[in-house]
Amino acid sequence: MAQKLTKRKAFKFYRSYYDVYNELSNADKLKFIEAILDRQFLGIKPNNLTGMARFAYLSQEHSIDLQVKGYEDATKSNLCTENEDVILENNDPYKGGYEGPNVDPPMQEKEKEKEKEKEQLIDSSKLLSLYNSILGKTARVVNTKTKSQIKDRLKEGYTKEDIVKAITNASKDPHHIDSNYKYLTLEFLTKPDKLDRFVNMGDYKIKTQIL
């Protein structure tokens, strides 16, 4: 494999990255860190991540992308084209520069539709594992109503990333922290008003009480 060169010298490694990292197995930790480094230094989005490593990355993707955009805006450059060795040998389909085999436009559109349909599917067991990991719960099933709500939210334009973000943000809500997340079920989180609230929730600031 060619050496991965980059003109970018550094980026901020946030505490939230470390918190999520510590929840992963050793194998997924490596995948997660490599995904962050490739995105931050080479501009490569980790399309090949699976399992918990993928969910971990998605939970931090918004801040990672903001950092990359900040660098590109400040330097008026694009990380993918700035680094000469981004296109690796063997036409690795998960790295930049690979367009895939030549196919007829109609076939290409069908493939895109299939990929879009796949993106709308959520692995319930992985979602449940992430939910339990973030909130310290031991839930065992995603009920039918929740699955239906998730499907509806995706049709409305929400993404898998939004659902992960909502769970992460909800875990910081003082009200739910005080109740030990008693009412913070997946069914509750995927209601339209609740999902919208937690996806767009800002950082909570600790209020000092003067007695």
Image (cartoon, helix red, strand yellow):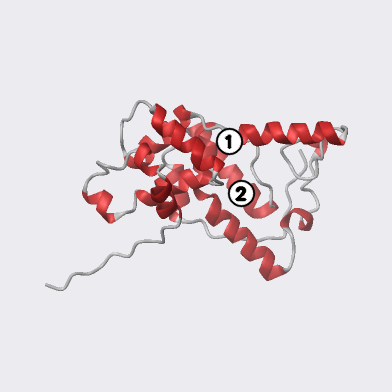
Secondary structure of the residue carrying tag 2 is helix
Which numbered disc covers residue 120? 1
Q: Quadrant of the N terminus?
A: top right
**Tags 1 and 2 in contact by the CB under 8 Å rule?**
no
User: What type is the residue that disc 2 sits on?
Assistant: Leu
Q: How many marks?
A: 2
The residue tagged 2 is 37
Q: Badge 2 local density, few (<14 within 10 Å), some, or many (20+)?
A: some
Q: Nearer the viewer, residue 73 or 87?
A: 73
Q: Nearer the viewer, residue 158 or 125?
A: 158
Residue 167 appearing in the image: yes
Q: Residue at x 41, y 33 (%)?
A: 146
Residue 22 picture location, percent across and down: 42, 42
Q: Quadrant of the C terminus?
A: bottom left
Residue 109 picture location, percent across and down: 78, 36
Q: Residue at x 74, y 52 (%)?
A: 5
